[in-house]
Amino acid sequence: MGRYIINRLLVSIPVMFGITLISFFIVRLVPGDTVTALLGSNYNEEQAAILREKYGLDQPLYVQYFIWLSNVLRGDFGYSSFTNQAVLDAILERIPVTLELATLSVLIALLIAIPLGTMAALNRNNFFDYSASFLGMIGISVPNFWLGTLAILFFSLHLGWFPSGGFVPIQDGIFANLKSMILPAVALGTTVGAVTMRMTRSSLLEVLGEEYMKMARAKGVSKGRWIWKHGLKNALIPVITVVGIQAGYLLGGSVVIEQIFSLPGIGQLALQAISNRDYALLQGTILFIATAFVLINLIVDLIYGILNPKIRYD
């Protein structure tokens, strides 16, 4: 397995190199630049030239790219042009919020989706199955920003059960922390839960039709063992793939939810970087999200071997 992990990491190197290219050049396609964002519309060319030289923007793009890439390889992601804070420090400050939000979203989604999808598969083509499928369709169709807004209006402003926004660090109290995160986690995790539920249902239905499942049932295996050990364990492989992909999207797709609930996470940081044309900060956040995707995919591949003993990493 150690050799497999090393090989996967080596394969990820050209992927990460491609991401650095895309992240560097695509942010420069946006109209304006760091200098115009700093100086506003009223500035003289002398001031602009001084700032462009300060931030290295007066050099050709390919030169800027190789300078930035060489700094990144040394662990230097640069400094924010607006706050003068080191990009790496800014990202590390925001990571706990986004990771907690993504983790809670996935946990809530799994705790609801897998039992619901399992029950829907076991009660195929009856009222429970149709109801679960209908809820899954709604969960996929409803935008998370609309659901988040409704949650604030009803549970915060009308009932007063949860705060309408803001983040409470976990060191200030676990209950207060969870109370500040539950609404955004539910809003963000609804789509994940709906997709996971539908995948669990379809995957389990396919497994239940296999010959070995019929043989296990004929041998007198208890229904609980038949479902959970023989059925669901084999059905979870494609489900894990979907959850892994969705978890990666949560890290980058939390921009809107973090903005609605005023959560100081990576998504909000990326949005601020876009608004301010803060190249170094935006490139750093994109690189972080891409790295998270690569690591999540690696973890998903390793989980395959746990769920299916036939998979070997030689």
Image (cartoon, grey):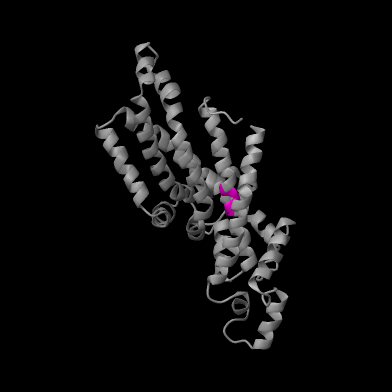
What's the magenta bit mostly, secondary-structure-wise?
Answer: helix
Side of 219 relative to 104 (left or right): left
Residue at x 56%, y 48% (from the top left corner): 293
Check the image and report above or below for 6 versus 19: above
Q: Point out residue 256 in the picture as x, y percentages from the top left corner.
A: 48, 59
Question: Which quarter shows the C terminus?
Answer: top right
Which quadrant holds residue 242?
A: top left
User: Which residue sits furthest left?
Assistant: 126
Query: Was residue 292 drawn as part of the magenta stretch in this picture?
Result: yes
Residue at x 40%, y 23% (from the top left corner): 227
Residues in magenta, as a range: 289-293
Question: Which quarter shows the N terminus?
Answer: top right
Which quadrant holds residue 91?
A: bottom right
Q: In this rendering, does residue 264 appear at all? A: no
Q: Point out residue 224 in the picture as x, y percentages from the top left corner.
A: 40, 20
Side of 289 relative to 128 (left or right): right
Query: Was residue 94 drawn as part of the magenta stretch in this picture?
Result: no
Q: In this rendering, does residue 15 appear at all? A: yes
Q: Point out residue 295 in the picture as x, y percentages from the top left corner.
A: 59, 44
